[in-house]
C-alpha cells in the first residue's frame, strides 16, 4: 500500500479509492463457507480482535439476560481491583453463616460453608470455573464490603467499556426480575477487555477444566477449552428465562477471536455451535496487514485554526481478515465530526477509517491527527467567518 491514500472530503465524511481490487482475469472472490449458526439461536457474534471485524453477526444489539455470563464482569471487576492493589489474591475471607444460608448450594455453587476462609483468588476461581453464585457474592463482600457497592462498580466498569445497552443488578447473574441485561455487542467489548487488558489474570483464572474445594471436584461447563485448538475460556450461562448463553474466546497463530451465543434452546446446541463457530472463524479467514501504524490516509478540515486542514494517520497497524483464498476489493472512507475546531493536538483521536471488505460488514479503526493546528488569531478567525458567510 502506498504511504498515502488520496481522499476527497465532505463535511464530516470522506471517501477513498478501493484497495486490493481483483486483478484482471481473476474470478470474483468466493464467499466463505456458511457460518455454522443454526436459526434456532437468536443471537450470535464472532469478532476478530486483530481487526475489529465482525466475522458473523446476528441480532447483536438485541437485549437479553446473560445469566451466569454476568460473572465475566465480576471477574473483570476483581481484576481491576487486584491491579490497583486494593485487594490481594492471597487475602482470606471469612464465610459467614448468613452467606452460607443464602447462597451455598443456590444454583451453581462452590458450596462454601460458614467458618471457612477461602482466599480472594480461590473465590475468583470458584466464580470463573464452577460458576459459584456463593463465590461471586463472597468476592463482592470481600472487596467492597457490600453487594450493592460491588454492583455499582460493575456498572461503572460497563460504562467505561462503552457497554451502553448493559446493566447489572446482581453479582452473579441470578434471576433478578430483568434488572440484569446486556447485548452480544456489549459482551464482546467485555470479552475483549478481559483478555487484552488483563492477559495474565485471564490465563490464571479462566480456562480451568475442574475445581476441587473441600474434596468436592466439579467440572467447568465451558464447551470450547480443551476441545477446540487455541480455545481458552470464558463463561457459560443458563436460566429458564435466558436460555443457554456463552461468551468465549480463543487464540490461534496470533489471531484472537471472541464469540457470543445467546438464547440457545438447549445446552447441546449451544455447545456444538460454539465449537463449530470458533473453528469456522479460525479456518475460513486469514488476516493480512493493510497499513502500518503512522500511515497518512487523508486530511480533515479545521475551523478557526492556523491551518485549514490537518493530516490524519493510522493510530495502530490496520489489518483485514478475508475469506481464505479470496482477493476482493476494499472500500475506504474517513469519518469525523467536522470541521474540527482548533486547537487540534498531534496524536488526538479525531476520526475513524471505515473499511468495507468486499462481501463483509464494514468496520472501523481510529485515526489521529498527524500534526498540531493551533487556534488562529482574532483577525484570522474573523476572516474565516466572513468567508463562511460569503459561501
Image: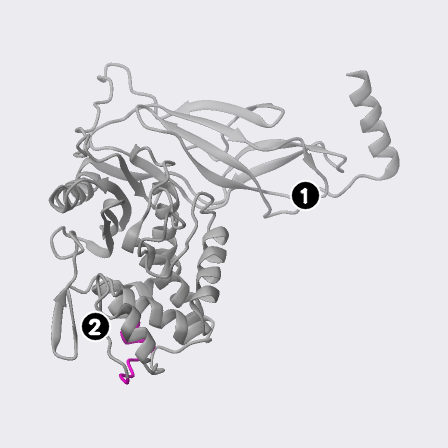
**Crowding at label 2, few (<14), some or many (≥20) Cα neighbours within 10 Å?**
some
Residue 204 can be seen in this image: no
Is 29 situated left or right of 307 in this image?
Answer: left
Above or below residue 356? Residue 166 is below
Residue 374 relative to residue 38: left or right: right
Q: Does the magenta stretch include residue 365?
A: no
User: Front-most of 128 and 68?
Assistant: 68
Residue beneath the point at 21% across and 72% down = 111
* Nearer the observer, 82 or 212: 212
Indicate the secondary structure of the residue bearing disc 1.
loop
- Residue 359, by quadrant, is top left
Q: Which of 100 and 8 is in front in this view?
A: 100
Q: Residue 374 at x, y = what percent?
A: 74, 43
User: Please, which residue is most extreme toward the right here?
Assistant: 379
- Left or right, 56 with reference to 362: left
Q: Quadrant of the C terminus?
A: top right
Instruction: Find residue 184 and report its horizontal and vertical position in percent.
Output: 34, 42
Decide if residue 82 is in sight here. yes
- Residue at the image point whose x is 49% and y is 41% from the top: 366
Q: What's the colour scheme?
A: one colour
* Gap in angstroms between the C-alphas marked 1 and 2: 57 Å
What range is drawn magenta here? 115-123
Residues marked 1 and 2 touching at CB (< 8 Å): no
Look at mark 2 in the image and give the residue it sits on.
111
Choose the circle earlier in sequence order: 1 or 2. Answer: 2
**Residue 28 rendering spot, x and y as whole percentages:** 24, 18
Q: Residue 17 falls in which quadrant of the image?
A: top left
Residue 344 badge = 1
Q: Which of marks 1 and 2 is in front?
A: 2
Amino acid at each position: 500500500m502506498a504511504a498515502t491514500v488520496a481522499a476527497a472530503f465532505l463535511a464530516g465524511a470522506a471517501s477513498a479509492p478501493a484497495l486490493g481490487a481483483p486483478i484482471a482475469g481473476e474470478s470474483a472472490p468466493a464467499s466463505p463457507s456458511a457460518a455454522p449458526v443454526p436459526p434456532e439461536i437468536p443471537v450470535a457474534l464472532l469478532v476478530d480482535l486483530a481487526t475489529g471485524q465482525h466475522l458473523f453477526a446476528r441480532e447483536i444489539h438485541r437485549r437479553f439476560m446473560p445469566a451466569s455470563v454476568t460473572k465475566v464482569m465480576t471477574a473483570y471487576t476483581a481484576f481491576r481491583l487486584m491491579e490497583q492493589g486494593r485487594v490481594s489474591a492471597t487475602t482470606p475471607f471469612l464465610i459467614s453463616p448468613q452467606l452460607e444460608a443464602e447462597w451455598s448450594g443456590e444454583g451453581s455453587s462452590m458450596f462454601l460453608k460458614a467458618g471457612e476462609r477461602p482466599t480472594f483468588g480461590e473465590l475468583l476461581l470458584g466464580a470463573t470455573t464452577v460458576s459459584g453464585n456463593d463465590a461471586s457474592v463472597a468476592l463482592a463482600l470481600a472487596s467492597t464490603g457490600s453487594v450493592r457497592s460491588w454492583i455499582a462498580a460493575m456498572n461503572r466498569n460497563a460504562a467505561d467499556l462503552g457497554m451502553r445497552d448493559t446493566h447489572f443488578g446482581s453479582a452473579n447473574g441470578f434471576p433478578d426480575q430483568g434488572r440484569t441485561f446486556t447485548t452480544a455487542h456489549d459482551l464482546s467489548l467485555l470479552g475483549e477487555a478481559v483478555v487484552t487488558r488483563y492477559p495474565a489474570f485471564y490465563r490464571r483464572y479462566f480456562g480451568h477444566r475442574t475445581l476441587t474445594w473441600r474434596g468436592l471436584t466439579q467440572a467447568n461447563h465451558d464447551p470450547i477449552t480443551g476441545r477446540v485448538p487455541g480455545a481458552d475460556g470464558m463463561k457459560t450461562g443458563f436460566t429458564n428465562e435466558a436460555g443457554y448463553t456463552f461468551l468465549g474466546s480463543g487464540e490461534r497463530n496470533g489471531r484472537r477471536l471472541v464469540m457470543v451465543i445467546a438464547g440457545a434452546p438447549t445446552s447441546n446446541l449451544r455447545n456444538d455451535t460454539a465449537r463449530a463457530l470458533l473453528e469456522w472463524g479460525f479456518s475460513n479467514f486469514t488476516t493480512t496487514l493493510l497499513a502500518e501504524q503512522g500511515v497518512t490516509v487523508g486530511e480533515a478540515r479545521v475551523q478557526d485554526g492556523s491551518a485549514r486542514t490537518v493530516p490524519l494517520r493510522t493510530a495502530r497497524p490496520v489489518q483485514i481478515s478475508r475469506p481464505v483464498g479470496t482477493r476482493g476489493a476494499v472500500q475506504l472512507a474517513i469519518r469525523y465530526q467536522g470541521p474540527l475546531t482548533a486547537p487540534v493536538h498531534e496524536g488526538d483521536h479525531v476520526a475513524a477509517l471505515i473499511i468495507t471488505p468486499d462481501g463483509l460488514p464494514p468496520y472501523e479503526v481510529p485515526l489521529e491527527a498527524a500534526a498540531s493546528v493551533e487556534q488562529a488569531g482574532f483577525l484570522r478567525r474573523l476572516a474565516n467567518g466572513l468567508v463562511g458567510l460569503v459561501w
